[in-house]
Amino acid sequence: MADVRIDGNILRLPGGVAVRFIRTLRLPEAGTHPLPPGLGEFPVRRVADYADRVPAQWRARGGVMLPVYLREAMWLSFAGTSEPAALQVGVGKVCAVSGRPWSDRPARDPQNYVVLPRQPWLDGINSGTGTVRQFVAVPLGLGATVEGQVTGEEVWGGVQLQSFALNDRELTRWRAEERLRAERERSAPPTSGYGAAMQGALPPPAASGYGPPMPLAAPPAPGGYGAPTPPAAPPAPGGYGAPTPPAAPPAPGGYGAPMPPAAPGSVPAPAAGAVPAGPPRAAAAMGLGVGGSLRQEVYQDERPLSDWSQKPAGRVFVHLVTPPEWRRITGEAAPPSPVDRAAYTRAGLPWFDWFDQDAEDLAPTDTLQSVKPVGDWLGDDHEPWQPPAPGQTQQLKDAPGTPVQDGDW
């Protein structure tokens, strides 16, 4: 397998796969909700850069790490993926799409991967028809993780990613089709009316690109971690992942105080006043449970399984670290806690609905439908909730429902 690399806070897996971990609003566990906004990227660091400060188990698994608060929600963005890929997403080595144990190859019946870049993002486990249940961070040992509920054990935690490229024959065919498509686009007159490129979308893909332009999540507040890395374009005001008001500053002396970010990929010096990095110790391990239900489809693969390589192109283990452990290990402060949910809605900032009438939703499995939200394990969520006002939710891509056809009058 080829190397996985960090580009800013983007994980780049072989075959052109790009994955970003996006901070977001945690939704109520009752009801079904539109897509929440992006609140900036989680900072991502290599485990190997802190080998003398992390547990031996982490060194053995390798990969990367990112800081996450208890009950903080996240979604995975695949914007920037340049070639077709089948991506497996594991939560504690349980497939987030099929609910089956982690596998070293793509499979059907049930499908155990998402198709990129056809799938623009993934906000949670595939748990209902046209819906997912939001990824929410919880500590291991309580039984609240997807891993604990499905397997009866909590051994792995974290997130696992594994990508598969098209086989050589299909990849050659796809690249030839992309070259022809790019040539036709270059020779076509510019579009200037209805149907012109939307402000804030990524520029049209290059000859090696794939799929339509996808909106990016917004950068966080100035000075925060996860600043945009070139050449990503900023989204349009009000687009999916639009900028949000900065989170309230932490209490004096608390974690999350602003710090200048380190250069991408570098190992920063310990912060002033930080706890000295002692010998590696057992860290508080975190995994992913589930929260509220979101309107989001997990798309069924339209290709035959034989189009994909049976050997993974690359894989990576993503460790989830508590903010105190993140500071002890890296010397950096974790990002501030997420923006208050009611304040976001009161400000009139957008929510989003995404529907693709040309795609078929992947049916959920009984395994993932039965996973209970973290509130059943940790107690009720007492944070105030204010639903979006009428007109505050924006429709992305196709309008839901079958179009009504007109006839002769």
Image (cartoon, rainbow, N blue to C red):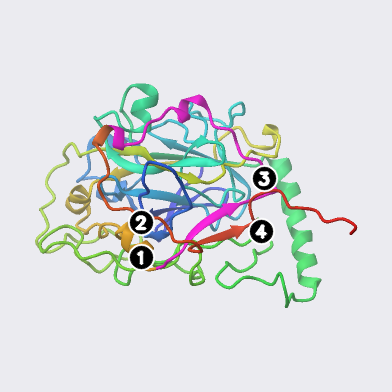
- Contact check, label 2 and label 4, Cβ < 8 Å: no
Classify residue 110 by image quadrant: top right
Residue at image position (33%, 53%) is 385
The earlier-in-sequence mark between 1 and 3 is 1
Instruction: Tell us which disc is closer to us: 3 or 4.
Output: 3
Q: Which sits in the foreground, 322 or 267?
A: 322
- Magenta span main SS: loop
Q: Which residues are magenta?
A: 348-376
| Mark 1: few/some/many CA within 10 Å (<14, 14-19, 20+) | few
The earlier-in-sequence mark between 2 and 4 is 4
Q: Secondary structure at mark 2?
A: loop
* Residue 166, image x, y percentages: 65, 42
Residue 19 is at least partly visible in this image: yes
Classify residue 20 by image quadrant: bottom left
Q: Which mark is residue 386?
A: 2
| Mark 4: few/some/many CA within 10 Å (<14, 14-19, 20+) | some
Q: Which residue is mark 3?
A: 359
* Residue 286, image x, y percentages: 28, 39
* Residue 403, image x, y percentages: 73, 52
| Mark 2: few/some/many CA within 10 Å (<14, 14-19, 20+) | few
State how far apart marks 3 and 2 are (Cα): 32 Å
Residue at image position (51%, 44%) is 2
Instruction: Tell us which disc is closer to us: 2 or 4.
Output: 2
Q: Which residue is mark 1?
A: 346
